[in-house]
Amino acid sequence: MREPLRVLIADDELLARKRLSRLLAALPDVSVCGEAVDGDSVLAAVRAGGVDVVLLDIHMPGLSGLDAMALLPEGGPHVIFCTAHAEHAVNAFEHGAVDYVLKPVEAARLQKALERARARLPARVKAPTATVPAAEKQPLARLPIPTRQGLVLVSPDAISHASLEDELVTVFTAQGDFLTDFTLNELADKLPPEHFHRVHRRALLNLSHVTRLEPLETGGYLARTARGHAVEVSRQSARELRRMLGLRKGAEDEG
């Protein structure tokens, strides 16, 4: 028996959510793990974990479906758009959507899309936590970065940020900038969480190196580092930063 596919339904229309819920209930090896009515609640549900696939509408209050997808963490759930708007299909696939299903959603079409998503999922391995050595979960005192000149050992304090460009991650440090095979998720696991924060799906930022936060029209920030680099902070991450720094809520935090 296959592991149930954990599906989050995201649509601001109650009837649309009920239809999807009814269709999913009739499919084998599928479970509805939650519902969301806007982009922010999608991101909150994904952060809570336990989501394999998001059935995502395009037009929702606040963040659009495409905006929400762009803010999903690397390695996060796969996205299947369920929408009445065919004109966004090309953009959706360019952003990495698994499928694009037009409303009214039919059972056979939805099942086909879910099977596509399932085929992309790695097998979930059930293993006791004790089998993972505690040392592997601890932040590293020195981060080893392989380069053509050899292995560079970098102190986490010297790292200002890491960014993903064209499928390659670059680590920016006081010693220089280094390409690495680490993913941003792997770097986040290896670096001290009290300093390093995932501020964008393409960026990990050491707040200790930030000298200025410049507001953007999107509701996010442009973080300026001491070395003069600019790192984009998403709107969702900007909200979390304001809470962490004890700043007054902005207008975009309301509602």
Image (cartoon, rainbow, N blue to C red):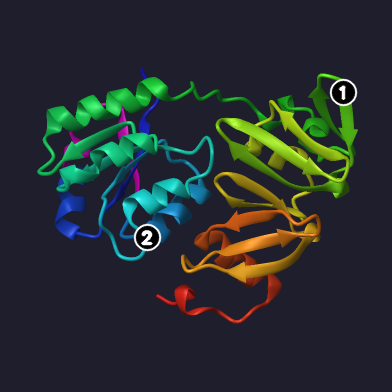
Q: Quadrant of the C terminus?
A: bottom left
Magenta residues, start to end: 22-35
Q: How would you rate the neighbour count of disc 2 (Cα within 10 Å): few for under 14, some for 14-19, many for 20 or more?
A: some
Mark 2 or mark 1: which comes first in sequence? 2
- Is 24 one of the magenta-colored residues? yes
Residue drawn where x is 21% and y is 52% of the image = 17
Magenta-colored stretch includes residue 88: no
Instruction: From the viewer's perspective, tell me whether residue 170 is left or right of residue 23.
Output: right
Determine the image quadrant of residue 239: bottom right
Is residue 80 in view?
A: no
- Against 218, residue 255 (above or below) is below
The residue depicted at 13 percent of the width and 27 percent of the height is 108
Residue 243 at x, y percent in the picture: 63, 71
Label 1 crowd bin: few (<14), some (14–19), many (20+), radius 10 Å: few
Residue 198 x/y as whole percent: 63, 50
Q: Is residue 24 above or below residue 11?
A: above
Q: Is residue 205 above or below residue 80?
A: below
**Dot label at residue 10:** none
Query: Label 1 belongs to which residue?
Result: 151
Give the residue pinned by disc 2: 63
Q: Residue 103 at x, y = what percent?
A: 13, 44
Residue name at image x 49 percent, y 21 percent = 123
Residue at 74% from the left image edge and 50% from the top image edge: 193
Dot 2 falls on a residue whose secondary structure is loop
Q: Amino acid at mark 1?
A: Leu
* Label 2 vs label 1, nearer the camera: 1
The amino acid type of the residue labelled 2 equals Leu
Indicate the secondary structure of the residue bearing disc 1. Answer: strand
